[in-house]
Amino acid sequence: MHQVIASPQHDKFVIVRPGSRKGMQIPSTMYRDLAEAVQNGTPVPGRLADAARTAWGVDISGEPSKGTVLVRPVTRLNYSRATWEINKGCNFNCEHCYLAERKFEGLPRDEKSRLLEMLRDSGVLWLQFTGGEPTIDRDFRDAYREAYGMGMMIEILTNGSRLHQAETVQLLSAMPPHKVTVSLYGASSESFDSLTRKPGAFKLLSKGLKAAKEAGVSLELALIITKYNAHEIDAMRAMAEEYATTYSEYGNISPTYDGNPEPLAAQAPGFLNKSTVFKGCPAGHTFFHVDPHGFVTMCKVGRENPINLMAEGLPGLLRLPGIADAQMLRSGGCSGCKLSATCRVCRPLAKAYQEAKAPLETYCQHGNGGKVA
């Protein structure tokens, strides 16, 4: 199996290694040299061997290029990233979930393979498996192996409840992902099980964290702050320090992507993050989202005018930038706002808040007395 991946990234070329956060930009000449070395079956070029030793501490000098280096071709579309809801089904029932529905359904096995081939051929290097809970999909492990074999750098967004399963943790050890992001909903059974509405959820999460640590699988924890666990934030940070390489904190709860306000009830007052000004987004231009049935949208929230990738194929993606731009240019109920230059909310998400008739203090600076902090 390949040790490093050489890939186009827009107008540049990069070298990355599965399981590592480090990468490097390379000149086009080096990319072409690597492609020729793989095609001709010659050993790994010396400058790549030197770079790999410096960046990752691995010795691939003298190794055959074919099998050691995976060279991804230049594509017409040249997308970079994608998120894939392999299935919206979930074994938790979280109060704050942004999904409009959580039906356990999706593409059959062979169509999942065809979808992955199209993602590869569109240029996707960075692929996030999400859901629902992706690890409960019957085809998750097979799809993961396929994507890995295609030279994709994989992120898994998971609730951690299945990380203790031997087949899953062995897969992640043998084929290391770019990262595994585990959502942490509390530091006790009381808080965790209350938000997930799943008795025993915290025990499953704890087993998963321990199994991943013992197997050497690197984790990133996403600390989801809600009214159920805000009093445990220090304990949640301590768990992250124990089990994760890095962690982030999220206090903003959104409505469902179609404007249902129910998730907002889980919001913890005083933990809204309004610090980052929204300065635009390349959604639909450099990355996209795919739902369980192969419908493509600009992102997880902006789901208007989906493109049926399974029916239209890659040419359908040519329409995506225009669809994304139309959603980004819309201001809706924010027309004429004097704080628009310092707005913290993207346009599709603002639309969801407005349709949910969400209180301004849950997302807008007007709800904070017009202050930008």
Image (spheres, rainbow, N blue to C red):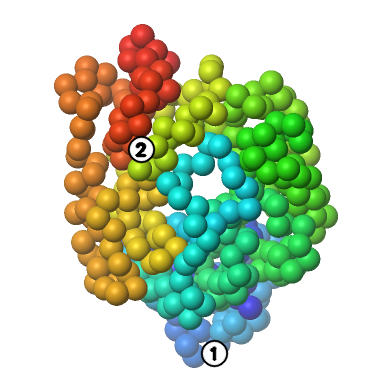
Pick whichever of labels 1 and 2 is earlier in the sequence.
1
Residue 94 visible? The answer is yes
Q: Quadrant of residue 78?
A: bottom left
Q: x, y (%) of residue 189?
A: 76, 36
**Left or right: residue 84 compared with residue 229:** left
State the SS at label 1: loop
Residue nearest the observer in this picture, 21 or 349: 349
Q: Nearer the viewer, mark 1 or mark 2?
A: 2
Q: Residue at x 38, y 20 (%)?
A: 359
Density class for disc 1 (Cα within 10 Å; few <14, some 14-19, many ≥20) is: few
Q: What residue do we see at 30% from left, 30% from top?
A: 354
Q: Residue furthest top?
A: 369
- Which three-letter amino acid code belongs to the residue tagged 1? Gly
Q: Which residue is nearer to you in this view: 83 or 99? A: 99
- Quadrant of the rendered image containing residue 72: bottom left
| Amino acid type, residue under disc 2 in the picture | Gly
Residue receiving disc 2: 259
Residue receiving disc 1: 41
| Residue 159 x %, y % | 64, 48
Task: Please say if 90 is above or below 67.
Answer: above
**Is disc 1 in contact with disc 2, using a CB cutoff of under 8 Å?**
no
